[in-house]
Image (spheres, rainbow, N blue to C red):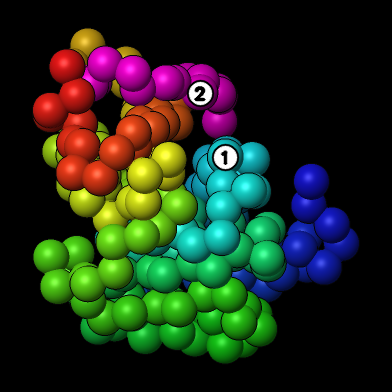
Amino acid sequence: MIGGTSSENLSRFVDLFEKWNRSINLSAATTRAELNEHVEDSLQVVPLLASCRKVLDVGSGGGFPVVIAAISLPQVAFTALEPIHKKHAFLRTAARELHLSNLEPRAERLEDHLVHDYDAAMSRATFDLVEWLGLGCQYVAPGGIVLGFEASPRADLPPGTVRHPYSVGGKSRSLVVFHVEHKGSSAEGSD
């Protein structure tokens, strides 16, 4: 799935992340092993986004998973929303230094974002998972998907949500995928 150039860029991203993390605290992850675990976790979204044209990532922070996905899927256009300016500056630097012309970091909050026709929207650890599934639906075109990361199985996910289980660092996790049927559908209203 990941070619030579992508592997090199993944390694370059981790190097850049380590450098910036020492100065501006992008993440609690500090060791190379912890960062590699974040990369492996982020790579789980790649197969689910491979057929997309436009993807929104909300609360992009230190670039997991959006930078990893942008490196792995150069044909997909990614918009990364990160309102915290120092983290936004990091994302801009990563896009520039890794030559990711398909990654557009924006210093913007979700509620201020005016584009609502993405093929997919994803967020990792920014909102409560059920809240995110409802919010994400508002930014995805009919037939698109909303992705969220689930650390522990929850019983309150909306009907129709599909889990994609995986294991990273000995921990069981899941990507949850909610399919947007029609404009105006939401996770809360899809009973």
Query: Which of these two is toward me, 32 or 143?
Result: 143
Where does the image place residue 90, in percent across and percent down from the top left? 41, 80
Residue at the spot x=33%, y=79% of the render? 106
Q: Tag 2: residue type?
A: His
Dot 1 crowding, Cα within 10 Å, few <14, some 14–19, many 20+: some
Q: Which residue is farthest right?
A: 4
Element carrying mark 1: helix
Q: Is residue 159 magenta?
A: yes
168 left or right, relative to 92: right
Q: Residue at x 26, y 81 (%)?
A: 107
Can residue 154 be seen by looking at this rendering? no
In the displayed structure, 85 sits above or below 129; it is below
Q: Residue 164 got which mark?
A: 2
Identify whether 131 is placed above or below 165.
below
Q: Where is residue 41 in the image (x, y as percent from the top left)?
A: 53, 41
Q: Residues within 10 Å of mark 2 (few under 14, many from 20)?
A: some
Please provide percent x and percent y for residue 75: 68, 65
The residue carrying mark 1 is 48
- The residue type indicated by label 1 comes to Leu
Mark 2 or 1, closer to the camera: 1
Residue 139 in view here: yes
Q: Do the residues labelled 2 and 1 touch (CB within 8 Å)?
A: yes
> At numbered mark 2, what does the secondary structure look like: helix, strand or loop?
strand
Nearer to us in this view, 130 or 5: 130
Magenta segment: 157-173
* Residue 131 placement: quadrant: top left
